[in-house]
Amino acid sequence: MGRRADGPMGGTAREERPVSPSAHPPVLESQAYSFWYGPTQALHDVSCAIPRNAITALIGPSGCGKTTFLRSINRLHDLTPGARHEGDILLDGGSIFAPGTDVVALRRRIGMVFQRPNPFPKPVYDNVAYGPRLNGLAPAGELPDRVERALRQAALWDEVSDRLREPGTALSGGQQQRLCIARALANEPEVLLMDEPCSALDPIATQRIEELLVELKQTYTIVIVTHNMQQAARVADYTGFFYVGNLVEFGATQQVFTRPVDERTEAYITGRFG
Amino acid sequence: MSAFRRHLTSRVMTALVVVLSFTAVLALLLILGNLVAKGASSIDWAFFTKSPVPAGQSGGGVANAIAGTAVIVGLAALIGVPIGVGAGMYLAEYGGGRLGFLVRFIADVLNGTPSIVVGIVGWTFIVKPTRHFSALAGSVALAILMIPMLARTTEEMVRLVPNSLREAALALGYARWRTSLKIVARTAMGGIVTGCLVGIARIAGETAPLLFTALGNLNFTLNVNQPMQTLSLQIYVYATGPFDEWHRLAWASALVLMGLVLVISLAARWVTRQRYGSIR
């Protein structure tokens, strides 16, 4: 927790959400990052600074590179055959692509929640305990406490506290997704990447997760890909708009949604295409 | 096409499919029925506990062959399962490159190799250098038959594990090998176990590869450096022999072997059901 204690506690009430970059110093910086799947270029010179202890939404039409960019941040593309990149992404000022970077350690600092809930076919408890147990974050005696804390953070504890031995796959879709969030949180990452975490969920489960995000940004930096512009407008402090592999616009959510600089952003958020 | 013709075609095709599937099942029923009719009466306590008696005398059993089958097949599984499953894991998780292609190709060729050829290989590389037939040589031959089968079924099963589970583990900070071992292999475990059981059932009935390796033995032995009897070898010797008493025992041995294979196959089905129960 120590490394996060010095971070500013960003605005809690929506109205006073601070937008000046100095209030949210960047934790991630993308520098002219380009990415190719084989011969196909998926990202073009993406540059942005993602602020700490804030929610950053990435929006844009399907196939525009949002998810590709998200998966670049924790180097999940390392296993994609034929993938290559140019430019750089910095985490706390250090390149994540620097030679000798421990990818496994990097992924422990950058958690991820996927589009579809993907709990392991194991008990609920083990799903959450896997990360900390593997990464030696907690002595065996403290593991149950840590599991409970992560499940409480993900607003799932009350529903599963008496079902910890049941397989994670037996939960409902919304519960599974919150289980996946708890699993990521139990690792105590600095950054939480979320790839359309609500796309498979009903409005009630979506609302729970949105409330959760706003709570979590006290401690975590959250980057969320979403197709739902209302969602971006509701929860995000910053918003980036991707279009055919370009980061067209990036700024405070309020500015992007009310006074977009680029006409393509305006066209997208007003529903004229996309 | 008129409605009448459409219905007629549908009826005829349905009837045809039912008849054909019944024919397929009929073969199994005929074999089982025949075995029970001719073999069941010879199965008694002595059949399981006594070794064969000299030709011409009545009585005796096939305890040597039952124990030998267990030893030879068990040893073959001990050798074959780790290699076959390991190769399958490699093929599924890391086998994208040229080496993977080569291994897959070799496995397919080996899968199609006649079992008698594998027996000759066992004879050439183990029996000849050691100058005697042995159960061990038989186990090695059976393991060679088993490995490519297990490699390919394991590969199939491991490929069924959704990629999202691998990504979830990697994103939690699992190293690649740990992801394969802890998440992927465990998730595919039911299918892998089923594959192993089917493979074991398959080799339990093999005769040809054992003719040149385990040879057969009318006395009870558990020494893997000695020639050893199996049920399949026993059936081969007794069924081709001149005595009625031998024929009787051959039928009974065939029934026991068939029952054994059936039990293993049923166990495999049961494990498969458990698997679908757990993954959903």
Image: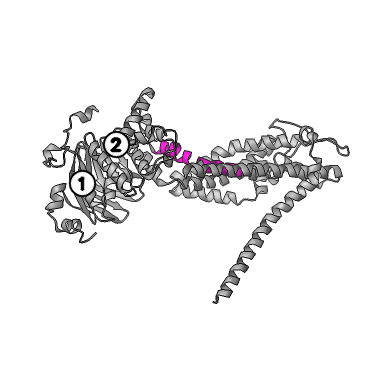
Residue B110 on image: x %, y %: 58, 49
- N-terminal-most mark, 2 or 1: 2
Task: Please give the label number shown on residue A234.
Answer: 1
Q: Is residue B100 in view?
A: yes
Residue B230 on image: x %, y %: 72, 39
Q: Is residue B238 left or right of residue B177?
A: right
Q: Which residues are magenta?
A: B176-199
Task: Please give the label number shown on residue A106.
Answer: 2
Q: What residue do we see at 71% from left, 52% from top? A: B29
**Which of labels 2 and 1 is toward the front?**
1
Is residue B76 found inside the magenta-colored segment of the image? no
Both labels 2 and 1 in a single chain: yes
Q: Amino acid at mark 2?
A: Leu
The secondary structure that most of the magenta stretch takes on is: helix
Q: Chain of mark 2?
A: A
Residue A205 on image: x %, y %: 32, 44
Q: Is residue A146 left or right of residue B181?
A: left
Quarter of the image with the C terminus of chain A is: bottom left
Q: What SS does tag 1 mark?
A: helix
